Image (cartoon, grey):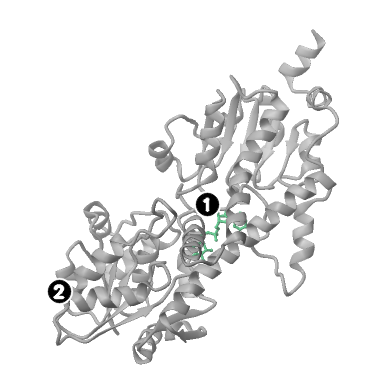
Amino acid sequence: MRKIGVIGLGYVGLVTGTCFADLGNRVYGIDINTDKITKLQKGKAPLFEPGLEEMVERNMQRGRLFFTTSYEEGLKDVDFIFIAVDTPSGQEGEADLRAVRQAAGGVAELMSHPFTIVNKSTVPIGTGDWVAETVSANLRPEVEFSVVSNPEFLREGSAIHDFLNPDRIVLGSTDRRAAERVAELYTPLGRPVMITDLRTAEMIKYASNAFLATRISFINEIAAICEKLGADVKQVAAGMGLDHRIGPDYLDAGLGWGGSCFPKDVRALAHMAAIHGAHPQLLRAVMDINQDQRRRVVRTLREILGTLHGKNIGLLGLAYKPNTDDLREAPALEIVHLLTNEGAKVVAYDPVAMDNARNAITEVEYKNDPYEVARGSDGLLVITEWNEFKHLDMGRIQKSMRQAVLIDGRNIYDPDAMRQLGFIYRGIGRGYGETNSVAEELIAAKSPATVSDSES
Ligand code: UDX
């Protein structure tokens, strides 16, 4: 059993600390947010992550997991200190390291026994050296310490699974023994451990996220070409994925990537490259394509309806992906802005993210279910591929809409089935995007208001 301190209780820090407690260690979670700590001390998880609240409660009851706002209380006898504070994007896309600096300085002022600082936060290449300098500058000279980079590869919504079933553990340090001590914490997981230097470990994190983002922008570019040439990108991706060199994952065309990591990490890597004289032309294109995805669906809707002014547009989903309540850099944020800018009235529903959305998105009317969102609307956009949207009564939806226009931003529906039901359907890359005559399709859609208009 080891004694571990975790500073920063976002989904990375909280999942890391709770899982280490579940592996039998004694863990002290520290965060400056008193509301978060108060909630955690009652055994309540301050964020939506499947399975987390139960694991927090169980380990607190077993006396293995404690939460405090005090560095003094949290770090008094720990051997390892994990820094898992957020590193948001600055003005130019650079990573903002103020929270890391505060954590490293706070640790240094306190520690009086040997310890290992483990950097879990995604930090620019070279930060490990900087953390070592920051700690050295503030630490009592007789106290020994080491710095280890241990990047995380946790996906929101499956973070506990990803922590307990990692493809690999990456550790970087100038002190191999320190890295081996951190590796011992992960021994119960029985997964490959890679020990390298600090900068290489930090680069593995950025390069991995940037590559996954690149795959997504790649398939989104292929989707745009499919719409011009009449191919179905879902089947293209399936055929590509059977090649063992490509694999099936991260080839879902749609509204692109959001969240607290891909956008921030791709921007930060491109920024690091640019300021060090390496021209990040591919990364810039990857970001541009991603940005276009949000605009593309609004343009499609405008082309079909003729105008968005005065139109009722329904959004199914708001979170940046399913199984999370996180709206950070979610496509919904830009899409709502674009729609309301053109005078549309936006109505939305999300199974989990609505509380967060009410604070982040004020120009939307919220409904309690997808059918209420669709009723009387001129267009329905699938923004997040929640499972509950995959089994809706689409015939009922079609009849309830003023104009049966369905823009499937995550390709969860079958185009032919939707057209059979009378929708004007557009997916992302699902065969020809345009049709010869939208008017014919509108009439064919047999949507009540439209047909009566054309008969009058
Ligand atoms: C990501 C990385 O996967 C994880 O390793 C890292 O630690 C944190 O960032 P996360 O942001 O939680 O995890 O979500 P992920 O499931 O990877 O999806 C990222 C984004 O890509 C989401 O917006 C998702 O909607 C989008 N996506 C994913 C696609 O558009 N297409 C795909 O095929 C897969």
Residue 387 placement (x, y as % from top left): 60, 49
233 over 447 or under it: above or below: below
- Disc 1 residue crowd, few under 14, some 14–19, many 20+, Cα 10 Å: many
Question: As rendered, which of 72 and 210 lies closer to the eye?
Answer: 210
Name the secondary structure under disc 1.
loop
Residue 61 placement (x, y as % from top left): 27, 68
Quadrant of res 338: top right
The type of residue carrying mark 1 is Gly
Residue for point 39% across, 65% down: 12
Residue 214 placement (x, y as % from top left): 62, 61
- Which residue in the structure is indicated by mark 2? 110
Residue for point 21% across, 69% down: 105
Residue furthest front in the image: 277
Q: Indicate left or right for 256 with 178 as reference.
A: right
Q: Which numbered disc covers residue 258? A: 1
Q: Is mark 1 within 8 Å of ligand 1?
A: yes
Q: Earlier in the sequence, mark 1 or mark 2?
A: 2
Name the secondary structure under disc 2.
helix
The type of residue carrying mark 2 is Leu
1 over 163 or under it: above or below: below
Question: As rendered, which of 137 and 418 lies closer to the eye?
Answer: 137
**How far is mark 1 from mark 2, CA to CA?**
37 Å
Q: Is mark 2 within 8 Å of ligand 1?
A: no
Residue furthest top in the image: 456
